[in-house]
Amino acid sequence: MNHLPIKIDKDYTNRQISIISEFNAPKDKIWNAFTNPEITDKWWAPKPYQAITKKANFKDGGQWLYYMLSPEGEKHWCFAEFKNIRPMESYEASDAFCDENGKVNTDFPRMNWTNSFHEENGITKVTNEIIFSQEEDMKQILEMGFEEGYSAGLNQLNDLLNQ
């Protein structure tokens, strides 16, 4: 496994996490890895979890409903709603934990993502800007292992690209 260089900045004052990762792959391949659930399911959940999509519709106002399956068979449901899609450039998503029907679990914070993609000389840089409503929400997500889990997922994507 090659570890992907990942830069993570946490700005508690502005309730924002910024993540920059670079892949040795063309932008269309990375865009598809983020927007096509058949590919996303292969890398999104940190091992030993698996991501399994129940439904996905990548368009403005579209939704992605999926769960992370634990090795013990527990399902952790999540939901994302997409907006401001600029194909091959960027999109925004608001995500949350939920039940199997997509009803948001208010015990956990929502995350508002802006994902941008830029290619130069065959290297694609992905920038994730995640904004939280409150500083406490950001702290809760980080305490739940977001940084380690998302970094593991990005490394799994890198491994997938190198197969």
Image: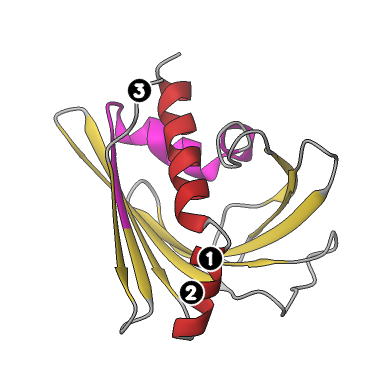
Magenta segment = 19-40
Examine the rendered structure and indicate whether residue 65 appears above or below residue 6: below
Between the C-alphas of marks 2 and 1, the distance is 6 Å
Category of crowding for the residue at label 3, using alpha-carbon neighbours closer than 10 angstroms: few (below 14), some (14–19), many (at least 20): few
Name the mark on residue 2: 3
Residue situated furthest top in the rendering: 163
The quarter of the picture where residue 100 lies is bottom right
Q: Is residue 64 magenta?
A: no
On residue 139, the disc is 2
- Residue 27 lies left or right of residue 158; in this view the side is left
Q: Secondary structure at mark 2?
A: helix
Taking the spot 36% from the left edge, 73% from the top edge, the residue there is: 16
The residue most toward the left is 121
Say whether disc 3 or disc 2 marks the residue closer to the N-terminus. 3
Going by the numbered disc 1, the residue's amino acid type is: Glu
Q: Nearer the viewer, residue 59 or 77?
A: 77
How far apart are labels 3 and 2 at the CA level?
29 Å
**Earlier sequence position, callout 3 versus callout 1:** 3
Residue at 39% over, 50% down: 87
**Could you tell me if residue 70 is visible in this image?**
yes
Q: Give the answer, above or below, for where 136 lies relative to 117.
A: below
- From this view, report whether residue 46 is shown above or below residue 90: above
Quarter-wise, where is residue 70 in the image?
top right
Q: Are marks 3 and 1 in contact (CB under 8 Å)?
A: no
